[in-house]
């Protein structure tokens, strides 16, 4: 048996290729939309992808299962569980086979048994793998978003992200019972999860890529809670706010992702094109480092720096119903191809143009002045607060703000800022900060694009504020 793990750092998402070397058949589990790595790996190993499946209807990225099965002619295997509301709607159109609890399919001499493990989602399955060429008992399991290293999948997404009111407590109870179903499985069973640290599909995921069921039984908090009521309270407590794009991902993956085919990079555009696009309502996302954006940027653009958090903040802040233009500096090591692929991975397919760093000079020459976001340091901020000359906006999470904040600060988490700009007072200059500067720079760009002009960026953030010995508040002021 051959086993390969693929990991997308931006999504903190794992997918897998499992092959039978004796027959040359291969299975891909939970592929994302960038399918070329699976194709290359299969070709390198002398395998043919004959089966494609996924553990559940994903909420944090667009599935590549339909596209990969179509490209390779593989059998597409989708969950038949979940009831009418969360059964795959495109299964018939795509010619997919549905699998239910207890089903078994063979990939050459590798046997894969289906276990229905609802809780994170109603249709969720895990796949228990036995290499029958050399063993009669299972080696490992693809646990998807049901069981992680150190955590379990969150059961609140259908209610909080997809708008299915009143579902999260029932889902938490399902999750508890799904964990009980693992009792007959051996301690040596390897756990191959669908996500790692940084994913919003759980609250305390480990950074280790895989584990064993025995280790999780000993050290994963979820196995240490024997009472169902206590488990429900614990698993629902402290879950992070889900990005709003999760609802869009659920809909796309349930109804059927659009097949992309060969990817064509968007054309290069100049300052006149960007000006015209902004006037027409397009979004221009500047992916340069935040410090460069703050120093000089085209007015009306939004800063979403390239990096590990790029797709996360793109999903929070960029709309799905408008054209996008990217400002990209390839010298940063983040290429246009990487960024466009990352956006496509969460369904943001409407990138119509890319501008290089020369856009700034071209803008000055033909369109007008660039914008600069003024900075303020902790000494100036402290003095301004004592004189009540500024208002302070803290764009950290509610939990961070409650644990400690600048006295008198208003808290609007960055992900909610687009929809809550109207709550901000305009009678004084507004100072924006976060923990260490990254989120605040993005927030300042959003506010500037929405017409907030009397703006200051406190890049040192709450970390510097505390270190400098300034007063703090906690909880509600």
Image (cartoon, helix red, strand yellow):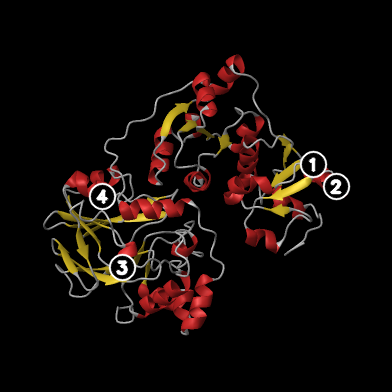
Q: Answer yes or no: do the residues labelled 4 and 1 have beta carbons within 8 Å?
A: no
Foreground label between 4 and 3: 3
**Label 3 vs 1, first from the N-terminus:** 3
Q: Secondary structure at mark 1?
A: loop
**Spatial separation of the CA atoms under disc 4 and disc 3:** 21 Å
The correct choice, above or below, for 343 with respect to 31 in the image is above
Residue at the bottom extreme? 227
**Label 4 vs 2, first from the N-terminus:** 4
User: Which residue is identified by label 2?
Assistant: 388
User: Which residue is identified by label 3?
Assistant: 83
The quadrant the C terminus occupies is bottom right
**Spatial separation of the CA atoms under disc 1 and disc 2:** 9 Å
User: Which residue is identified by label 4?
Assistant: 66
Q: Answer yes or no: do the residues labelled 1 and 2 have beta carbons within 8 Å?
A: yes
**Which residue sits at x=24%, y=47%?**
68
**Label 1 vs 2, first from the N-terminus:** 2
Characterize the local packing of mark 1: few (<14), some (14-19) or many (20 or more) Cα atoms within 10 angstroms. Answer: few
């Amino acid at each position: 048996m051959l086993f390969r793990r693929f990991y997308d750092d931006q999504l903190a998402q794992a997918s897998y290729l499992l092959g039978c070397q004796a027959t040359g058949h291969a299975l891909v589990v939970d592929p994302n939309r960038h399918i070329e790595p699976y194709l290359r790996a299969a070709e390198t190993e002398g395998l043919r992808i004959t089966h494609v499946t996924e553990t559940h209807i994903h909420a944090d990225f667009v599935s590549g299962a339909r596209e990969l099965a179509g490209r390779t002619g593989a059998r597409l295997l989708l969950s038949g569980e979940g009831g009418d509301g969360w059964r795959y709607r495109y299964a018939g159109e795509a010619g997919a086979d549905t699998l239910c609890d207890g089903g078994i399919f063979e990939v050459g001499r590798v046997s894969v048994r289906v276990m229905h493990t609802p809780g994170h989602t109603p249709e969720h399955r895990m796949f228990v793998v036995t290499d029958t060429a050399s063993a009669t008992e299972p080696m490992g399991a693809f646990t998807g978003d049901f069981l992680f290293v150190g955590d379990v999948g969150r059961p609140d997404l259908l209610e909080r992200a997809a708008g299915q009111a009143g579902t999260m407590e029932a889902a938490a109870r399902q999750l508890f019972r799904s964990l009980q179903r693992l009792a007959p499985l051996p301690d040596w069973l390897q756990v191959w999860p669908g996500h790692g640290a940084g994913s919003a599909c759980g609250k305390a995921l480990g950074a280790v890529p895989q584990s064993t069921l025995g280790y999780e039984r000993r050290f994963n908090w979820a196995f240490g809670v024997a009472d169902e009521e206590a488990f429900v309270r614990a698993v629902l407590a402290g879950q992070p706010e889900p990005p709003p794009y999760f609802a869009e991902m659920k809909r796309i993956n349930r109804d059927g992702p659009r097949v992309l085919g060969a990817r064509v990079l968007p054309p290069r555009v100049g300052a006149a094109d960007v000006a015209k696009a902004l006037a027409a309502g397009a979004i221009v996302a500047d992916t340069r480092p935040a410090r460069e954006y703050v120093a000089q940027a085209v007015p009306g653009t939004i800063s979403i720096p390239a990096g590990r958090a790029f797709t996360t903040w793109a999903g929070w802040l960029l709309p799905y119903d408008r054209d996008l233009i990217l400002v990209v500096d390839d010298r940063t090591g983040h290429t246009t191809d990487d960024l466009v692929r990352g956006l496509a991975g969460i369904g943001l397919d409407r990138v119509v143009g890319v501008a290089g760093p020369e856009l700034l000079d071209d803008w000055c020459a033909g369109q007008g002045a660039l914008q600069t976001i003024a900075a303020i340091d902790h000494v100036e901020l402290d003095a301004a607060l004592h004189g009540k000359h500024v208002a302070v906006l803290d764009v950290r999470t509610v939990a961070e703000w409650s644990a400690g904040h600048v006295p008198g600060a208003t808290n609007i988490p960055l992900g909610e800022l687009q929809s809550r700009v109207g709550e901000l007072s305009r009678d004084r200059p507004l100072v924006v900060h976060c923990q260490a500067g990254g989120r605040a720079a993005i927030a300042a760009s959003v506010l500037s694009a929405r017409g907030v002009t009397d703006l200051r960026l406190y890049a040192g953030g709450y970390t510097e504020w505390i270190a400098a010995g300034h007063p703090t508040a906690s909880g509600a002021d």
